[in-house]
Image (spheres, rainbow, N blue to C red):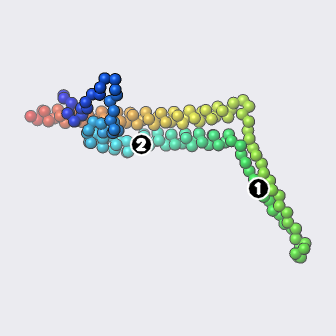
Amino acid sequence: MATPGHWTVPLPAAGSALTTAQPWPHGFNDPALARFIEQALTHNHDLARAGLRLYQARLQTELTRRSQQPQLAASLDIAGAGGAGREAWRDRGIPTASVTYQPDLWGKLASQRDEAHWRASASAEDLAQTRLELVAEASGLYWRTGEMNARLALSRQ
């Protein structure tokens, strides 16, 4: 089976890379293939779940990072007491402030930070892998459908 002419691209000069200004599905000059892949990517639940896992992992990484920073707190308590006359009224304010910091003596916090970072990295890799598998499957199905249609057309001749 011959490759369609609109799928071919002139080879680059020796030592240079083949480049295209378009994303790779569009490099085949087959709008139907590009649409098919985009639909598969848009409407796939596995890809959406992988994206949500990545988002959750990034949020957890940020929470871990923030929990390891010094925590500041401040408050102002105002209390008053008095009788019937204006002169008898007394009030007082008590400002308080606190700073909390947990030193990482045995590396526990660093391990938590590393774990959160690696979980986010693994989730990003899972998303990329899921996307790649989906594109490969969609492309294969598209080309098998084209091959079956070509065989069907040949058998009708």
Asked if residue 130 can be seen in this view, the reply is yes
- Residue at 72% x, 29% y: name it: 106
Tally of marks: 2
* Residue designated by label 1: 75
The type of residue carrying mark 2 is His
Residue that lies at the very extreme toward the right in this rendered image: 88
Q: Vertical placement of 152 versus 48: above or below?
A: above
Between disc 1 and disc 2, whose residue precedes?
Answer: 2
Label 1 – label 2 distance at C-alpha: 47 Å
Q: Position of residue 50 (x, y in %)?
A: 46, 39
* Relative height, residue 22 to residue 81 (above, below): above
Taking the image as shown, residue 96 lies to the left or right of residue 62, namely: right
User: Mark 1: few, some, or many residues within 10 Å (few <14, many ≥20)?
Assistant: few
User: Residue at coordinates 26% horizontally, 38% vertically from top-left?
Assistant: 29
Instruction: Name the residue tied to disc 2.
Output: 45
Residue at the extreme bottom: 85
* CB under 8 Å between discs 1 and 2: no
Q: Looking at the rendering, which quadrant does residue 142 occupy? A: top left
Name the spot of residue 93 as percent of width and height, x first: 83, 61
In front of the other: 45 or 16: 16
Residue 150 x/y as whole percent: 17, 34
Residue 151, located in which quarter of the rendered image?
Answer: top left
Q: Residues within 10 Å of mark 2 (few under 14, many from 20)?
A: few
When the figure is inspected, residue 8 is found, relative to residue 37, above or below; the finding is above
Examine the rendering and report whether any part of residue 148 can be seen. no
Q: Residue at x 34, y 44 (%)?
A: 39
Residue under the image location 18 percent in, 28 percent down: 1
- Report whether 84 appears left or right of 152: right
Helix, strand or loop for disc 2? helix
Residue type of the residue flagged with mark 1: Ser
Which image quarter is the C terminus in?
top left
Disc nearest the viewer among 1 and 2? 1
